């Protein structure tokens, strides 16, 4: 997505905006600043992103959502910290906190960055002349951040690979499956802390929410595999994985940057690393995440001493669902293709121990 | 004489009634969809409902069409933002040319990041 020109980012369409509920507020009631014709004077004390203080600015009218949003992964980025915490040790937390602040927390999303303007992380800019959008525009909000993997898969931007059937045939947008309550977080964190990572707790959304009838009797594959397989194992196609992300702060500009060693298309069926009552599947799709033991070495030596505590091939839900896929064409179309399965020889030697639990110890029997 | 007094009294009563009729207010304008505010938040943001106030929705749905309160509230609340806000902030931020002219040159620092984020 091309960045907007500076004027485009802040051009207000007052004909539209003044007709909306939010347009009944004064500018300075949310943005502070001063009423003055001179720009510098007018911008004295300006708050460009009022929803950074969501509880005060947005919560006065939208309190229930703002309150639960405090626990949302969109707000906390807790998934990153959960992984860092698991792979590190307490004595490394200070250095990792600095890295987290520089490289992970920049994806933190405010109310305004979904409902008024593009996220700062992708350059910002009002969506629609400052009109508040109840449903964030998919490509300017959701896939602006979730683009390189989910967005490309869903919209069919990976070369020669079709987009997700829900988008291709039904033009469904993200919120058709990911309801506001899921995106904002919907309530009290459980004992297990629902904010721990995106796959903690109930499977929301679940394919069965819309497809409760799996035709077990008439579909022999569903009858045979039941809940042993995650739906995506049979209904996803090739998806993106990444390797070797390293982060640092530029000596030249003083700005944080990253470098990813490789990005490639992959398809890997392996054992479920987060098996639970909500996700009882024995076999799932795995995506290689770009962490390495040296990812944060700029901030200190050996900051991830427990690197092997989590696999580098992680539970994945590729967003490129198809009714018919190469692997579900027949029993043999999957069983006779060892290239679909994550086996030891496909894992880098330095990551072998981390992935012990997700590797296929044996391949499924060949079938006609 | 008595008859004259009675005639005068009748005339007086008649004139009083006529005067009363002419002073009566004209029938209030029929409230139309345009004149009744449809968005409760024009009133709601600063006045939280209290136990003594009827809920905003009740006011809207039960108000007779001839109610005079609603138009007067609209008249005092709605124009305020547009009249007071169409000033420096809005004047500048709705003017593309002015925004271009007043924009500070941005330092386009080339990102040192490499690969897919």
Image (tube, coloured by chain):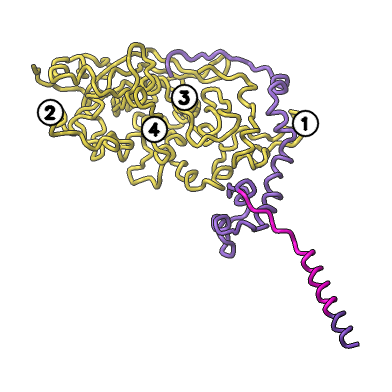
Colour assigned to chain A in the rendering is yellow
The chain displayed purple equals B
If you read the primary sequence from the N terminus, does the residue marked by circle 2 or circle 3 appear first? 3
Q: Which residues are magenta?
A: B10-32
- Alpha-carbon span between mark 4 and mark 1: 45 Å
Based on the picture, tell me whether residue B107 belongs to the magenta stretch: no
In percent of width and height, residue A164 lies at 33, 23
- Quadrant location of the C terminus of chain A? top left
Which comes sooner in the sequence, label 4 or label 1?
A: 1
Mark 1, secondary structure of its residue = loop
Q: Which mark is residue A110?
A: none
From the image, tell me which residue sits under label 1. Answer: A37
Spatial CA distance of label 1 from label 2 is 72 Å
Is A368 left, or right, of A212 in this rendering?
Answer: left
Protein chain holding label 1: A
Q: Nearer the viewer, mark 3 or mark 4?
A: 3
Quadrant for residue A314, please give it: top left
User: Disc 3, disc 1: CB below 8 Å?
Assistant: no
Q: Residue at the far right: name it.
A: B1
Q: Using the image, name the chain to which the residue with label 2 belongs.
A: A
Question: For this view, does B84 lie left or right of residue A135?
Answer: right
Q: Are marks 3 and 4 on the same chain?
A: yes
Q: Whole-percent x and y of residue A117?
A: 55, 29
Tag of residue A139: 3
- Report the Cα–Cα distance between label 4 and label 2: 37 Å
Asked whether the residues under marks 4 and 1 belong to the same chain, the reply is yes
**Residue A106 horizontal side relative to residue B13, left or right:** left
Specify whether residue A293 is in view. no
Q: Nearer the viewer, residue A69 or B43?
A: B43
N-term-proximal mark, 3 vs 1: 1
């Amino acid at each position: 997505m091309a960045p907007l020109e500076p004027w485009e980012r802040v051009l207000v369409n007052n004909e539209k905006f003044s007709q909306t509920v939010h347009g009944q507020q004064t500018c300075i009631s949310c943005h502070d600043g001063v009423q003055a014709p001179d720009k510098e004077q007018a911008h004295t004390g300006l708050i460009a992103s009022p929803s950074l203080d969501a509880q005060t600015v947005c919560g006065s009218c939208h309190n229930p959502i703002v309150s639960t949003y405090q626990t949302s992964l969109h707000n906390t980025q807790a998934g990153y910290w959960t992984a860092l915490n698991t792979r590190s040790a307490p004595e490394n937390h200070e250095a990792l906190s600095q890295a987290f602040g520089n490289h992970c927390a920049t994806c933190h999303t405010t109310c305004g960055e979904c409902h008024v303007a593009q996220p700062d992380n992708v350059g910002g800019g009002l969506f629609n002349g400052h009109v508040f959008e109840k449903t964030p525009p998919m490509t300017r909000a959701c896939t602006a951040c979730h683009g390189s993997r989910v967005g490309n898969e869903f919209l069919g931007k990976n070369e020669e690979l079709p987009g997700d059937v829900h988008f291709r045939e039904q033009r469904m947008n993200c919120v058709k499956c990911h309801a506001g309550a899921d995106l904002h977080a919907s309530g009290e964190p459980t004992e297990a802390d629902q904010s721990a990572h995106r796959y903690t707790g109930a499977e929301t959304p679940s394919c069965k929410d819309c497809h409760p009838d799996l035709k077990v009797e008439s579909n022999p594959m569903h009858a045979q595999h039941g809940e042993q397989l995650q739906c995506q194992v049979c209904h996803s196609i090739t998806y993106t994985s990444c390797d070797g992300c390293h982060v640092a702060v530029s000596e030249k500009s003083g700005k944080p940057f990253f470098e990813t060693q490789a990005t490639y298309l992959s398809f890997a069926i392996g054992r479920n690393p987060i098996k639970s009552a909500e996700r009882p599947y024995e076999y799932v799709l795995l995506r290689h995440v770009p962490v390495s033991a040296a990812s944060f070495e700029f901030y200190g030596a050996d900051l991830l001493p427990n690197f092997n505590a989590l696999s580098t091939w992680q539970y994945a839900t590729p967003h490129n669902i198809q009714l018919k896929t190469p692997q579900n064409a027949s029993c043999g179309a999957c069983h006779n293709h060892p290239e679909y399965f994550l086996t030891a020889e496909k894992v880098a030697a330095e990551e072998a121990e981390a992935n012990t639990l997700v590797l296929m110890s044996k391949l499924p029997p060949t079938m006609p | 004489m008595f008859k004259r007094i009675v005639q005068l009294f009748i005339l007086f009563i008649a004139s009083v009634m006529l005067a009363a009729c002419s002073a009566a207010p004209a029938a209030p304008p029929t409230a139309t969809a345009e004149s009744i505010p449809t968005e409760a938040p024009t009133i709601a943001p600063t006045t939280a409902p209290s136990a003594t106030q009827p809920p905003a929705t009740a006011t809207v749905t039960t108000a007779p069409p001839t109610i005079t309160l609603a138009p007067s509230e609209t008249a005092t609340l709605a124009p305020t933002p547009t009249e007071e806000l169409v000033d420096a902030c809005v004047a500048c931020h709705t003017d593309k040319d002015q925004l271009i002219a007043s924009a500070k040159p941005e330092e386009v620092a080339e990102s040192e990041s490499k690969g897919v984020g």
